[in-house]
Image: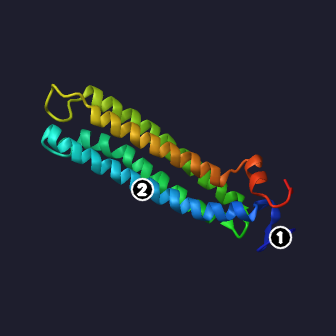
């Protein structure tokens, strides 16, 4: 294949049809699951904090920011996983789009890691709830849950836009790899 829609073929990588179909379906399933999971963790945290502290969210801006930053980072990762579908054109991977998506996924994961560290530091150093005797266990759990959900999204997104040769061999009908 010399050209594909006027582009040089070096900009496209052939994919096994089964793998391309899996990316199309799985990117939607995982992206939506990440978003729902993040919102579910946030809802459960607010529900648990209500009887513990008397209010669902920290009243100060610093506490609210520390709670929301990791969640927003995971939602950004979910959006990038959903956009992994745009890296496909037929059964071909558009390499330039895949590189851009990979860079955006890495940026989202970096922001997630930094925001989780900030959230842990804020919950350890600042009394967010105003009751000094309570340990910030819910903040610790929600931060680790957001990090775990974001890590799953990051790894799945990388698997979609940068498949290994062994993965492509598993999905291939005939050994072209």
Residue 115 is situated, as x and y percent measured from the top left of the image, at 40, 39
Is the Cβ of the residue at disc 2 closer than 8 Å to that at disc 1? no
Q: Residue at x 19, y 28 (%)?
A: 134
Earlier-in-chain disc, 2 versus 1: 1
Q: Is residue 58 visible?
A: no
Residue 170 horizontal side relative to residue 152, left or right: right
Report whether 76 appears left or right of 4: left
173 vs 91, nearest the viewer: 173
Would residue 58 appear left or right of 24 to someone viewing this image?
A: left
Q: Position of residue 58 (x, y in %)?
A: 20, 42
- Residue named by callout 1: 3
Give how far across and how far down residue 156 sits, in percent.
58, 50
**46 to the left or right of 132:** right
Disc 1, SS: strand
Q: Residue at x 74, y 57 (%)?
A: 171
Disc ID at residue 35: 2
Q: Secondary structure at mark 2?
A: helix
Q: Residue at x 61, y 64 (%)?
A: 24
Q: How many marks?
A: 2
Query: Residue 112, relative to residue 9: is it above or below?
Result: above
Q: CA separation, marks 2 and 1?
A: 38 Å
Question: Which corner quadrant of the image does residue 69 belong to?
Answer: top left
Task: Tell me where residue 143 appears, x and y as whole percent.
Answer: 37, 38
């Amino acid at each position: 294949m010399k050209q594909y829609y006027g582009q040089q073929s070096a900009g496209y990588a052939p994919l096994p049809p089964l793998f391309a179909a899996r990316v199309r379906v799985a990117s939607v399933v995982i992206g939506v699951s990440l978003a729902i999971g993040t919102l579910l963790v946030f809802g459960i945290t607010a529900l648990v904090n209500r009887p513990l502290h008397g209010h669902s969210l920290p009243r100060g801006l610093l506490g609210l920011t520390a709670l929301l930053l990791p969640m927003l980072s995971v939602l950004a990762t979910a959006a990038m996983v959903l956009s992994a579908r745009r890296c496909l054109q037929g059964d071909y991977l558009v390499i330039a789009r895949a590189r851009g998506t990979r860079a955006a996924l890495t940026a989202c994961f970096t922001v997630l890691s930094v925001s989780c560290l900030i959230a842990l530091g804020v919950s350890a150093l600042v009394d967010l709830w105003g009751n000094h005797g309570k340990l910030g266990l819910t903040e610790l759990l929600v931060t680790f849950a957001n990090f775990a959900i974001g890590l799953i999204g990051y790894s799945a997104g990388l698997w979609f836009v940068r498949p290994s040769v062994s993965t492509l061999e598993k999905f291939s009908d005939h050994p072209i790899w």
